[in-house]
């Protein structure tokens, strides 16, 4: 006995799937629903391709180009593997993040939300306008292959520059995680010509990563709030006492401090302004 007051829309079955229903519900309220990864997931073939690769390669490293990858989509993929293919997830020996100093704060806290051995390499720039992530990432992958003898790699990037890396290690095994809107036809054709598997991260369900999004926001907000909201209550109290010319004993001051501490709070107004009240 649930009723929806819906304007009639002659566009087939509204309940065909969640994405279609949400699209029209948003449309009816002059809004637009676009994040379909919240209600859909990659097809079985795409996920099986990834799971099979990991199961077939018990020693695998994930190499991540942070400049050309979305941290939330990677998190969604890793959680999908962990939940649906735990044996394959255990085959990921390490996740190496190659990060430029100017990329998202989320990379710094990823290890708090993903139960995997994560190495975070922050690459400094020699020239401000030139990133060195790609060359460091290429060099480290070669080192992992020749010195650590890791035979299989999940390469996370939509940058065609890494085609040179894959070509330089013809005996290594690669699977590439890309994002569909960032990956050109030429790269897909090159991967297909060499029978190198690839998966689009933006096809995977992302409704299970709200905690890392909240964590990233909190990391960014805390220093801004601390900088703008800082004041010393003892200093303010002394100023108030001086202006009111009230004589207080230390015991009376301590009692007032306790009162302020107990009742002091922040109130966020509808327009976003923050007020201190007590």
Image (cartoon, grey):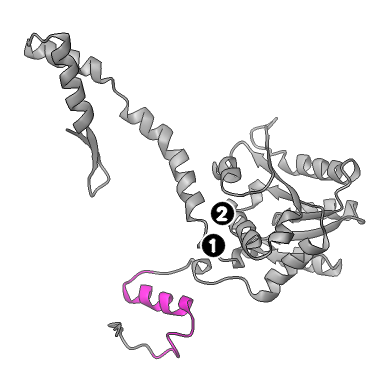
Q: Quadrant of residue 276?
A: top left
- The 10 Å Cα crowd at callout 2, few under 14, some 14 to 19, many 20 or more, is many
Q: Nearer the viewer, residue 110 or 250?
A: 250
Circle 1 is placed at which residue position? 206
Q: Please report whichever mark, 2 or 1, sits nearer to the chain's N-terminal start.
A: 2
Circle 2 is placed at which residue position? 72
> Could you tell me if the residues under marks 2 and 1 are in contact, i.e. CB atoms within 8 Å?
yes
Q: Nearer the viewer, residue 108 or 81?
A: 81
Query: Does the segment drawn in magenta span residue 120?
Result: no
> What span is colored magenta in the figure?
10-31
Name the side, left or right, on which 230 lies relative to 70. Answer: left
Q: Secondary structure at mark 2?
A: helix
Residue displayed at 54% across by 72% down = 40
Residue displayed at 10% across by 13% down = 243
Residue displayed at 70% across by 49% down = 64
Q: What is the total number of numbered labels drawn onto the structure image?
A: 2
Name the side, left or right, on which 186 lies relative to 218. Answer: right
Rendered-image quadrant of the C terminus: top left
Name the side, left or right, on which 233 lies relative to 112. Answer: left
Residue 146 lies, in percent from the top left, at: 91, 44
Q: Is residue 257 visible?
A: yes
Residue 61 lies, in percent from the top left, at: 77, 50
- The 10 Å Cα crowd at callout 1, few under 14, some 14 to 19, many 20 or more, is many
Q: Secondary structure at mark 1?
A: loop
- What's the CA distance linking mark 2 and mark 1? 8 Å
Residue 134 lies, in percent from the top left, at: 74, 44
């Amino acid at each position: 006995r649930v009723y929806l007051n819906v304007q009639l829309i002659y566009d087939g079955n509204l309940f065909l799937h969640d994405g279609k229903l949400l699209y029209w519900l948003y449309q009816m309220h002059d809004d637009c629903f676009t994040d379909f990864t919240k209600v859909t997931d990659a097809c079985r073939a795409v996920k099986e391709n990834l799971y099979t690769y990991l199961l077939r390669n018990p020693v695998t490293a994930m190499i991540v180009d942070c400049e050309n990858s979305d941290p939330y989509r990677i998190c969604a993929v890793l959680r999908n593997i962990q939940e649906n293919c735990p044996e394959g997830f255990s085959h990921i020996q390490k996740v190496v993040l190659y990060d430029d100093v100017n990329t998202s704060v989320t990379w710094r806290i990823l290890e708090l939300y993903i139960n995997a051995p994560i190495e975070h390499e922050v690459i400094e720039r020699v020239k401000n306008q030139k990133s060195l992530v790609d060359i460091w990432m290429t060099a480290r992958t070669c080192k992992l292959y020749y010195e650590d003898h890791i035979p299989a790699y999940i390469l996370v990037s939509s940058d065609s520059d890494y085609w040179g890396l894959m070509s330089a290690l013809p005996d290594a095994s690669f699977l590439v995680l890309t994002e569909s809107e960032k990956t050109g036809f030429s790269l897909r054709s090159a991967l297909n010509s060499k029978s190198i598997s690839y998966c689009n991260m933006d096809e995977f369900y992302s409704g299970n990563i709200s905690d890392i999004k909240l964590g990233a926001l909190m990391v960014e907000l805390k220093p801004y709030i601390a900088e703008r909201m800082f004041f010393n209550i003892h200093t303010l109290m002394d100023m108030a006492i001086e202006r009111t010319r009230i004589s207080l004993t230390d015991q009376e001051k301590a009692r007032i401090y306790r009162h302020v501490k107990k009742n002091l709070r922040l109130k966020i107004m509808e327009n976003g302004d923050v007020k201190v009240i007590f």
